Amino acid sequence: DVKVTQSSRYLVKRTGEKVFLECVQDMDHENMFWYRQDPGLGLRLIYFSYDVKMKEKGDIPEGYSVSREKKERFSLILESASTNQTSMYLCASSLPRGPQHFGDGTRLSIL
Amino acid sequence: AQTVTQSQPEMSVQEAETVTLSCTYDTSESDYYLFWYKQPPSRQMILVIRQEAYKQQNATENRFSVNFQKAAKSFSLKISDSQLGDAAMYFCAYRSPLTGNQFYFGTGTSLTVIP
């Protein structure tokens, strides 16, 4: 089975901090994704990557950046955390024409 | 961008009964993929069923089946013999092979199963 591992299930940070969310997949998938999930809004795509060192903006990239130095790892970076970035963050990976496989999610609180 | 609409924020069903969750989407593409995902309270999203647009036959996975109406751009999920473990948020998703393999998700339907 595909395993997508997010480094933390719960994280509490302070306003202005630089925050790193890590995601690792073990199935050699080309595509990786970061979403945030908020009640009533569904999943909104922040960034995705279809290859090492490649990245594409999703629907809500403002305030975020990403890094993909290795195929299995896709990191989401909050450059200067703000309270409106309090949310559930989901990482996913997939083959080019396959379904997405998700991690357990990270519930991030910015105080 | 493609849009995916789930018009039922909440649904409920009696245990052992059948329920249908609705999903419509907007696209001008002819080749695409559709998915239903389930997110139980434990939070991990898991794939329930998938459908390739070029296939006319509706996908089926055990108690889960879809009604795919390509012309109407409709992709509903039917759950038969509902079980307590089916209680979850259900998300419909569209994938375009043309726009960088992005997925587009609906806002979800929260399904309650009544014992």
Image (spheres, helix red, strand yellow):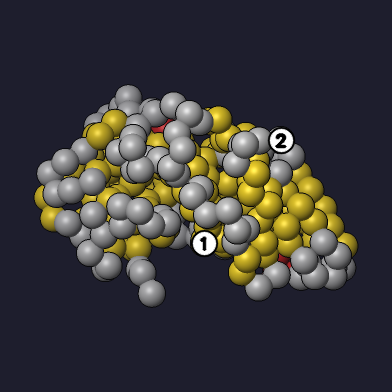
Q: What residue lies at 60% left-to-right and 58% top-to-bottom?
A: B57
Q: Secondary structure at mark 2?
A: loop
Vertical order, A102 against A80 (above or below): below
Q: Is residue A22 visible?
A: no
Q: Secondary structure at mark 1?
A: strand
| Kind of residue indicated by mark 2 | Ser
| Kind of residue indicated by mark 1 | Ile
Question: Which chain letter matches label 2?
Answer: B
Residue A74: x and y, percent? Answer: 24, 50
Question: Which chain letter matches label 1?
Answer: B
Vertical order, A38 against B44 (above or below): above
Q: What residue lies at 80% left-to-right and 70% top-to-bottom?
A: B81
Which label sits on residue B46? 1
Q: Is residue A111 left or right of residue B21?
A: left
Q: What residue lies at 35% left-to-right and 43% top-to-bottom?
A: B97
| Quarter where residue B98 is shown | top left
Q: What residue lies at 62% left-to-right and 36% top-to-bottom?
A: B71
- The verdict on a common chain for dots 1 and 2 is yes
Q: Quadrant of the C terminus of chain A?
A: top left
Residue on which disc 2 sits: B7
| Tally of marks | 2
Name the one closer to the observer, B48 or B61. B61
Q: Are marks 1 and 2 in contact (CB under 8 Å)?
A: no
- In primary-sequence order, the first of circles 1 and 2 is 2
Vertical order, A4 against A85 (above or below): below
Which label sits on residue A30? none
Name the one closer to the observer, A23 or A15. A23
Q: Is residue A26 visible?
A: yes
Q: Quadrant of the N terminus of chain A?
A: bottom left
Residue A34: x and y, percent? Answer: 35, 44
Q: Is residue A22 left or right of residue A36?
A: left
Q: CA distance from mark 1 to mark 2?
A: 21 Å
